[in-house]
Amino acid sequence: MTASEGRSCPIHYRYKPEELLRRPEFWNDDVVYVVGGLYGNPFALDEIEAMADRERAAGLSVRILFNGDFNWFNADRRLFASINDRVLGHEAMLGNVEYELANPGGEAGCGCAYPAFVDDGTVERSNRIMQKLQQVAGNDVKNRQKLGSLPRWRSIIFGGLKVLVLHGDPESLAGWGLSREVLAQSDGNRLADWFRRTGADVILCTHTCLPLTWSGEVDGRNRCLLNNGSAGMANLEGDARGFLVRLGASESPHGPVAFHRLTDLRLSLDPIAFDLKRWLSLFDRLWPTGSDAALSYRQRLVSGTRLTAGELYMGA
Ligand SMILES: [Fe+2]
């Protein structure tokens, strides 16, 4: 393992903001869920599908898009197959985890491109989790090939707005430019420039594991950014629920923790109240005490992060 594994941003992760919204798809569904960072949690996936079914029962059409890192803790042959079979039955795009599963053997390690504020121990453990997951994925040729054919971003016209769905940021699959840590240190010029260069009204992302929302005006148009944090892990202090982004003209029935409105489109961060007890029981079998994933993530699964709901909004 080299010193840069898990830290560097590989060249094949990079793209240009100007190319992202060149050929958008038109989606006419009533509701879209954008789900980042499922991290191999089958009980979060159960709940996401149940949330969609409840809306369908109320007469709405719902489309689900997984914007990467739906694999991570599922380093088990059957669980790997079942997570990927189920997720790939919906809309999906690459995260760095899926890229490294489909293209193993590079210098990227886990592909997280961790910045300096993430400690070395976390990076080394992530690289080892990736190696274990790559061994499992190597025996599932069908799903590995499917992962390799997924796009790195999706651009959608939805509700009359240009919606750009990313995994990392507008320049890299594993970019941290839309993380809480980077945005808190910035004067907002780079974010405004990214909205300008992509032409997006809405940017949705994940990858950095902590949720945030932002809204503001760029060149006389209102714009919105939502990072869902994680669908498969806790996001807030004392709250074990995952989050997804919901888009639609109708109001969310899921008790959103954050909410924005752009013209007729409502955008919210909705909680995913999955069965934590069953998830911990499975997690502990996959990743026993002292294992890399247990050391890095178990406390967060149970107790959440240090972030409060009042801190989600990062606009002016
Ligand atoms: Fe990621």
Image (cartoon, rainbow, N blue to C red):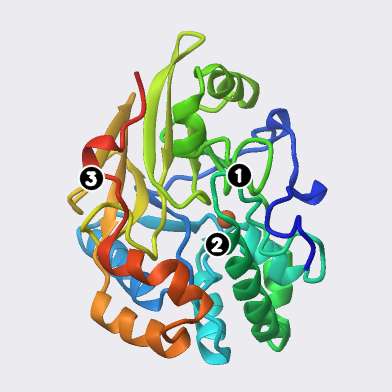
Q: Residues within 10 Å of mark 1 (few under 14, many from 20)?
A: few
Question: Whole-percent x and y of residue 2?
Answer: 79, 63
Task: Give the foreground label among 2 and 3.
Answer: 2
Let me know if residue 31 appears in the view: no
* Left or right, 247 with reference to 139: left
Ligand 1 falls in quadrant: bottom right
Looking at the rendered image, the quarter that the N terminus falls into is bottom right
* Foreground of the two, 158 or 238: 238
Q: CA distance from mark 2 to mark 3?
A: 28 Å
| Residue for badge 1 | 116
Q: Quadrant of residue 125?
A: bottom right
Q: Is mark 2 within 8 Å of ligand 1?
A: no
Question: Whole-percent x and y of residue 168?
Answer: 59, 45
In the image, what residue occupies the spot 46% across and 8% down?
A: 220
In the image, what residue occupies the spot 26% across and 63% down?
A: 303
Secondary structure at numbered mark 2: helix
Question: Whole-percent x and y of residue 258?
Answer: 26, 40
* Foreground of the two, 144 or 284: 284
* Relative height, residue 292 to residue 25 (above, below): below
Q: CA distance from mark 1 to mark 3?
A: 30 Å
As shown in the figure, which amino acid type bears the numbered disc 1? Ala
As shown in the figure, which amino acid type bears the numbered disc 2? Thr
Q: CA distance from mark 2 to mark 1?
A: 11 Å
| Residue for badge 3 | 257
| Residue for badge 2 | 122
Q: Quadrant of residue 221?
A: top left
* Left or right, 220 with reference to 267: right
As shown in the figure, which amino acid type bears the numbered disc 3? Val
Secondary structure at numbered mark 3: loop
Q: Quadrant of residue 171?
A: top right
* Relative height, residue 47 to residue 285 (above, below): above
* Relative height, residue 255 to residue 176 (above, below): below
